[in-house]
Amino acid sequence: MDHQPKFFENLSGTGKAIGVLTSGGDAQGMNAAVRAVVRMGIYVKAKVYFVYEGYQGMVDGGDNIVEVSWESVSSILQVGGTVIGSARCKSFRTREGRLQAAYNLVRRGITNLCVIGGDGSLTGANLFREEWSGLLEELAQKGKIDEEAVKKYAYLNIVGMVGSIDNDFCGTDMTIGTDSALHRIIEVVDAIMTTAQSHQRTFVLEVMGRHCGYLALVSALACGADWVFIPEYPPEEGWEDSMCVKLSENRARKKRLNIIIVAEGAIDCHNKPITSEKVKDLVVQRLGFDTRVTILGHVQRGGTPSAFDRILASRMGVEAVLALLEATPDTPACVVSLSGNQAVRLPLMECVQMTQEVQKAMDEGRFVEAVRLRGRSFENNLNTYKLLSQKKPDAELPKSNFNVAVLNVGAPAAGMNAAVRAAVRVGITEGHKMFAVIDGFEGFARGKIKEISWGDVGGWTGQGGSILGTKRTLPAKYLEKIADQMRTNNINALMVIGGFEAYLGLLELSAAREKYDEFCVPMVMVPATVSNNVPGSDFSIGADTALNTITDVSLFWCMRLLTKMRIVKYYTKDIVKHIYSSTESLMKH
């Protein structure tokens, strides 16, 4: 007898048919979303159909709309792009095209559509839904379907998932494909660092983002770029002088590499384009620096999806099927979005209208409002970049008597150094003295503590491990010595960056406050561990990098499989169906 627990037992897709399609520009992670829709649909006993080549396949019908099985989506999780194809479709923009698409769906009993694409694709899906009943009546009048079919398939349910590397859709913290595109950008930055440092070069990187600067902004934050240009936040008048001064100052501090990131849609405060070539010419003419331009182009769309995109798309796909099953004739079309760490459903057209408002605000020069409309995450990223990238003159800094110590505790985790850099620079901006503790609590007890400056943490963002050094040692047996060091250095606050050991360490310091007055100061912990096991936190620093390392290993095994099967690099719909059965055999060998 099967005692396996049944999830979603109250939801049944029996008698329902779901069509899934990808439309518009491709994005890494689309296949993970397709896979999730198919398997969740089959799990609830619904029929699931691939619609190949997006809306064009829906209009053309025939072999472009195919019922699929569980195995049809095996081993596509790690594949970039979309295995069911995507195409721009002019005919779907006409009523005649949508009429033919409706006929092709009704023939197969499909009244539930999951559309993965950008705002244009989702807007088209909503229009299709609004016209659906009228389209069926017209088909009946032409004798293509009978009145019974009109009544049986009277309503079309639509749910959308946003697949876009630009992260340009309002209402969601992240769109499918954005994280993978950021990986491609950072891979390029890491690759050019060695040659740039060897020759003391300035690199101007142009990244995608014709109407949205998210990729440029977040990649600048991730690599510690000297300057960034985005369409939502044009530089002030006289930016040319300010940028050249900053580049000169950084070069004077012995920084051998300068990075400037330009979104392809970057503009100045007069709505005039700022191009990568213009920036390069400016640096060469004013400063005489050896400057090169790198345009990433479609490299950002390529490659395998990151772990984050695979998980995000999978969760969204499951939620999309649940939304379709729970939909009623009065339920508006929705889009599955990410809010915090939760998959949520939002009204589709409200999000589309808000997205269009951003572009309208930029066109009218209301850039402060454009940033606000992009959402809290975008605004926070912009403020963080501005805070960490440019040091204010000492005369403008507030005066504080606070001394803050920063240390790493536990196993090393990727991102620890970026956290230390941010903490040090924010502290200095607030007027505090920042102290770095070497080798965790053990080093603290031995007096391995020193003041750290703004420039000391330059270039730390992309460094793995822990530059300060970290140990798992808990402070219990060193309490008196640590208290002495805090008294000697007049430490008024403590920031501990680490894993579960850091959590326990702060509990021990807190418990010792009755005995040691030195511990009666503000203490904060920043979770940083690949184990992601710190209470109270959804994500720990380092966990995402560890997941990507694991997925890279999984990709290695997949490539061995494809080599053994002598499969060419291009997937077809037939190849995808047969990969699954060979996986277990290969892993045994």
Image (cartoon, helix red, strand yellow):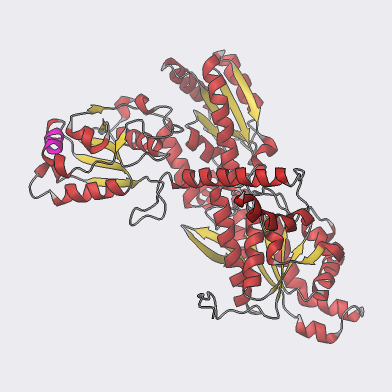
Q: Which residue occupies 55% across, 35% down? A: 186
Residue 52 magenta: no
| Residue shown at the point (42%, 39%) measured from the top left | 415
The magenta region covers 481-487
Q: Is residue 545 left or right of residue 127?
A: left
Is 52 left or right of 118, judged from the image as shown?
Answer: right
- Residue 436 at x, y = what percent? 27, 31
The vertical placement of 328 against 545, above or below, is below
The N terminus: image quadrant: bottom right
Picture coordinates of residue 548, whole percent (x, y)? 52, 45
Q: Nearer the viewer, residue 451 or 63?
A: 63
Q: Position of residue 14 (x, y in %)?
A: 67, 80
Q: Is residue 219 visible?
A: yes
Q: Residue furthest front?
A: 589
Residue 565 lies left or right of residue 289; in this view the side is right
Q: Is residue 122 visible?
A: no
Give the left or right position of residue 302, taking residue 141 as reference: left
For the residue pair 163 and 281, the one nearer the viewer reads as 163
Residue 255, percent from left and from top: 45, 19
Task: Specify the principal SS of the magenta part.
Answer: helix
Residue closest to the eye, 63 or 157: 63
